[in-house]
Amino acid sequence: MKPTARTESNAVVIELEGDADLAVVPEFQKLVREQMKANVKRLIIDFTKVTFVNTPVWAVVVEYFQHASGAGTEFALAGIQGRVEASFKIVRLGDFITHLPTLDEALRAPDLTSRR
Amino acid sequence: MNSPQPIASRQSVLIDVARRLSSTHDPVELVDHILQRSREVMDCEVCSILLPDGPEEDLVIRSTLDPINAMEVRVPKGRGIAGDVFATKKVVNIEDALSDPRHFRPASDRSDLVTRAMVTVPLLDGERCLGVMQAINPNQGAAFDAQDVEIFETFASLIAVTLLRLESQKKAIQEAENRQQLSLATEIQNSFLPASEVRIGDIAVESFYQPASEVGGDFYFWHEIDDGKILLGVGDVCGKGLPAALDMARGTTLIASTAHLCVTLNLAEWMAALNQRLCGVMKAGRFIAINAMVLCPKTRRVWLCCAGLPGAQVRDAEGWKEVPAPGNAPLGISCAARYQACELPLAAGRQWMLFTDGILEVRNSAGEYFEDAAFAAALAEMDSGDASLTRLVERWCGFAQASSYQDDATVLMITDHAAPPPSEISLQTCRPDTLRQMRDFIDAWAAWHALRDDLTGRLVLGCDEVMSNVCKYAYGPDCAERPALCRIESDADTIRILIEHRGEGITNEDFEKLVSPPSIGERVGGLGLHVIREVFDRVDFRRESDRSVIELVKSLAVASPG
């Protein structure tokens, strides 16, 4: 499934689905860079429906994280579980990128920058 | 002097009696007839027959005199003239029985009969005395003469033969009844056993069941559980024969009624629960040894719990070997007993065998146990081709043929017919959209080999990282020819994955440089190599002829704690 972006009440949500692998990277990267240009105030990447993630996908996440840190954008990941969580732990991105168990929690969080 | 019947008349009576002897099956009727005819021939007041009865071998009197029959007179062993003749097997002919010191008064005192002359003859079968006959008070004369004694002995020999015939008939009837009862018992016991063969999906179960007699204490069982698991095993109740058969019935019933608990309990917990129930119902000193297995075709895992029986065998690529499972106490002895089971991948072997000790303990005519060498030889023979239980059974039966001692013997053989997934995948074109095929290949292989999901996930990720790098860097975006191959193999300790491609690979030195930080947070590239290092215990990049090879090794000892 292609990644999609939608605007919720207080954030833009990029949703991934199924296996997020090398084949998904170009589309995902395009979508993420669009959000960089748009200078959104709050971005959440939703992994709830994702079954597999490899490092080229995490690299796109890191790219946005680095952008967000400089631009003062609130940024978080949501719904990381199962094999995705195992992959997330190996790359240790959880040490510095905010991540919440569910999209709902991420949307309701008052300040994403303080919730790593 | 007596005036005996004419000899011709006596012979005619004898012939008539002889005819009657071979045509009458009712012993009481026959004895009464003999006594009546012998009294006629002996021309005397009373004729009696005294036969041993009961464990004390008292002589019980049957007489032509009804009052005596009504009194049911018993002469204790060794007492009276009858007892003396029974013991000595010698004829006694006396003129005045009352004055004979051997005379047993209680018998005569209880009737109106005044005993005078008496001849007593033994009923002989060779050296064995079957009883005695007495003729009392000749109607003519004061005593029986030699001719009387001779004819009476002839009667006695006829009767002895008849008694033997009746005894043999009675024995035959008793044996037939026993056989019928045992046949019924066998039928009932078999109703507690499942079918001897069953196929559940890819799992085939075969059994061999040989009780030492018509009924036995061995049993086997298999039950399909709701969640797709199969509970199966063999059992051996202590002792043999009917008591063991009854406990076998109890054991199999309890197993059947608790099998469903294996959905929520693990095998060790189920064995403990079964043990507690058996402890509540087994008589003191009785117990059941059980080797049980739970097999899950979905997750391709096996759990084994051995409680008092020889270790289970598994047949892998190298042959049959004993499964290293923890030993446990037989069931029904102590409620406090704890049970341990081991967990193995179903792929640890294509076949599994559970059996009772009766298989190993049988001895041949040379005094050798089947366990000594024949069992291993039979298993080795089964290694060639498709191991069939029939071959083991033939060997065992041949060995046991001349055995003087044989216990109940049971074997359960489980064969996994699931086709193994391929151990190699060849991608014609290594592109981002074909990498999923390689991930599916690793997933399928790992599932068949019952790897834990977290380990499988890491292997899939690690291999995908390698292939992504091959795709992106070794082949680059413009390369037209992009073949890749992935091969996977394992032994008890390690999983080894080989990835081959025709692009330009990196060296081990390159890998070391690339995988070294700056910290992960600071870099965008190099994460894949970091993952590869994290997932695998050894990574080797090398060039072999025109191919680049990446060898990835994962140690299972580290991967499978507990």
Image: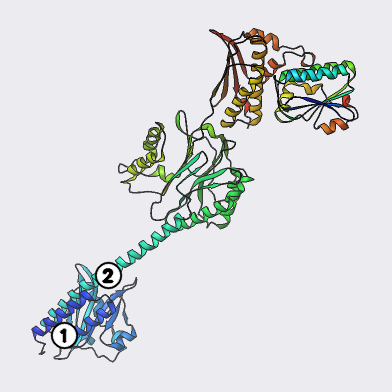
Residue B84 vertical position relative to residue A5 in the rendered view, above or below: below
> Horizontal placement of B402 versus B452: left or right?
left
The relative height of residue B311 versus residue B121 in the rendered view (above or below) is: above
Placement of B50 over or under B125, stated as above or below:
below
**Chain of the residue where label 2 is placed in the rendered structure:** B
Q: Which residue is mark 1?
A: B42
Q: Residues within 10 Å of mark 2 (few under 14, many from 20)?
A: few
Residue B430 in sight from this viewpoint: yes
- What percent of the width, then of the height, locates residue B301? 57, 36
Quadrant of the frame with the N terminus of chain B: bottom left
> Are marks 2 and 1 in one subunit?
yes
Q: Residues within 10 Å of mark 1 (few under 14, many from 20)?
A: many
Spatial distance from mark 2 to mark 1, Cα to Cα? 27 Å
Asked if B356 appears above or below B471 in the picture, the reply is below
Q: Are marks 2 and 1 in contact (CB under 8 Å)?
A: no
- Say which label, 2 or 1, has the lower sequence index: 1
The quadrant of the image that shows the C terminus of chain B is top right
Q: Amino acid at mark 1?
A: Met
| Secondary structure of the residue carrying numbered label 1 | helix
Which is closer to the viewer, label 2 or label 1?
Answer: 2
Report x, y in % for residue B356: 45, 45
Tell which of B318 and B133 is nearer to you.
B318
Decide which of B109, B333 is in the foreground and name it: B333
Between B217 and A6, the residue placed more toward the observer is A6
Residue B179, quarter of the rendered image: bottom left
According to the image, label 2 marks what residue? B167
Seen at 27% across and 70% down, the residue is B167
Residue B102 shows up from this direction: no
